[in-house]
Amino acid sequence: MNVNFIETKNKELKREYTDSILKTISAFANYEGGQIFIGIDDKNKELVDVVDYAKLKLKIENKINDSITPRPRYEINALSYGEKTILEILVYPGPNKPYMYKGVAYQRSDTSTIPVDQTSLVELSLKGKNISYDQLETNEEELQFTVLDKKLNEVRTVSNFNKDILITLGLFTNDKYNIAASLLADKNNFKTLGIDIVRFGQTISEFIDRKTIVGESILLQYDGAIEMFAKHYPDIEIVTGMKRIKKQPVPYEAYREAIANAIAHRNYLIPSNIQIKMYNNRIEVISPGGLPNGLTKENYLKDNLSVPRNTIISQILHILGIIEKFGTGIRRINEAYFGYDKKPSFVIKDNFIKVILPNILFNDEDKNEEARILNLIDIKTEITRQDVENLLSVNKAKAVELLNKLKEDCLIESIGTGKNVVYQKK
C-alpha cells in the first residue's frame, strides 16, 4: 500500500525508530515545528506496520523526556491505514529555545537535520528570552548621538536631547547602553558591521568609485548609500516627442527602500558589511543573514507578515521616517517598477538576502546575443529558454543553440530537466 507522503523541511519519514529522530525533534521545536512519521519507507513510500506501537510510543516518550532539554511540546499519535498502523510524532514550535539533544541544538536544512551554527544558537537563545540582539546591553559608557539628534529634529522638534530621550527611544537596557545605541551612536567599535558600496565599470575588475563606512552610525551608512546613488544614477532627460522628460535609471524609491530594509533587518550577529554593488545594468543590495525566524519566503515576498529582527532599530528608523511602515518594504520596491518591463528580483538564502534592482534605461541592443543573455541573467538570476526567445526574438532552435554555447563556454549552467529547466550563471 502506498501513501501520499513526501519529505519536506517540516516532515520526515522513517521506516523505523532510531535515535536520530531526536535530532529532528530538536530542530522542529527550535523552529517552525513539524511531523515525523514512523512506519513509512522514505524511498518507496510504502507502509511498514509498526509492531507493538503502544510500546514504541512509550519508548519514544521516555527518550524525548530524558534527552532533550528543555522538554519540547509534542504529541505521539497512532494512525491506522487498513490493517497497518504508523506513528506520528507531532512537534510544536517551542517558546523556551534552544531545545538541545545531548547538548547540541539542531535545525532543518531542506530534508536534512544539521547542528545549528554559533550565530543561530545565539539567535535561538534570544528568541527563547523574547528579546532581539539589539536589545542586549553593552559596556559602552561614552557614546555621542549628534547624528541621531539631527535626524530626530528633522521629523519633530527636540529642544533638549538628553538621556530621557534615549531611554524613551529604547536605547538603554538595565540602565546600560544596548547594541542599538552603539549602532546608532556617532562612533562605535563595530568594524565589521558597516556598509561597502562599489560602482563598477564595464567589468567587475574596474572600480569607478568606492565608499566603505564602518565604525560609524547606521544613519551615516544610510546617508552614504543615498549619496552614492545620487552621484552615479542621476536623472536622465529623455526626449519624447516635443518634450524632455526626466527619468530615473533605477527608481529612487526602490533603492531607498532596499537600503532601509537592509540596515533595519540585517543580522548584526554576522560580522559582515552590507554590500551595495552598482553596475551599468543593475544595483545589487546584499544584506547579511537570511530571513528571521517565523518569516517564510512567501510572507517576505508578499508582505503578508512583518517580523522585525532588530526591534529597537526598526522602531527608531520608523520614527525617523526611513522605514515608512512595517511589512511594506517589498511591496514598495515592486510598486516603484510599476509600468516597466524590467522588474526587481529577490534572492533569499540562509546567510544573505539579495535585492536586484534593474536599470530601466539600460539598453544593450548593440551587444552580441550572448552578452544580452548574460545581462538578462544578471537581472533575473535565472532564466528559461522562453526568456531568450522573447529577448532576442528568435525561435526555439536558435535559443537552445545560444544557451548551449554559453554552457560550453562554462559561463552558465542548467538546473532541472525538460520543461522545468532554468539557466543561471556559474
Image (cartoon, rainbow, N blue to C red):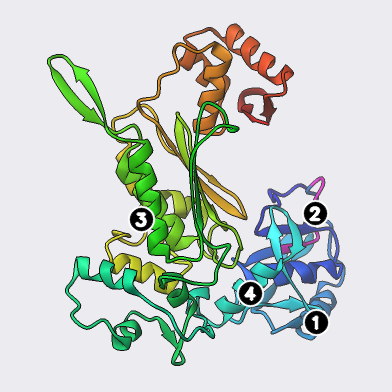
Dots 3, 2 in contact, CB < 8 A: no
Q: Which residue is mark 1?
A: 67
Say which label, 1 or 4, has the lower sequence index: 1
Q: Amino acid at mark 1?
A: Ser
- Which of labels 3 and 2 is toward the front? 3
Say which label, 2 or 1, has the lower sequence index: 2
Above or below — where is 41 with respect to 280? below
Say which label, 3 or 2, has the lower sequence index: 2
State the separation of the CA atoms marked 3 and 2: 60 Å
> Of the numbered discs in the image, which one, if any, rests on residue 47?
2
Location of residue 377 in the rendering, given as x and y in whole percent from the top left corner: 55, 28
Would you identify the image quadrant in which residue 109 lies?
Answer: bottom right
- For the point 39% across and 77% down, the residue is 144
Question: Visible in this render: residue 401?
Answer: yes
Location of residue 128 in the rendering, given as x and y in whole percent from the top left corner: 58, 80
Decide whether residue 286 is among the magenta residues: no
- Which of labels 2 and 1 is toward the front? 1
The local secondary structure at tag 4 comes to helix
Would you identify the image quadrant in which residue 291 lies?
Answer: bottom right
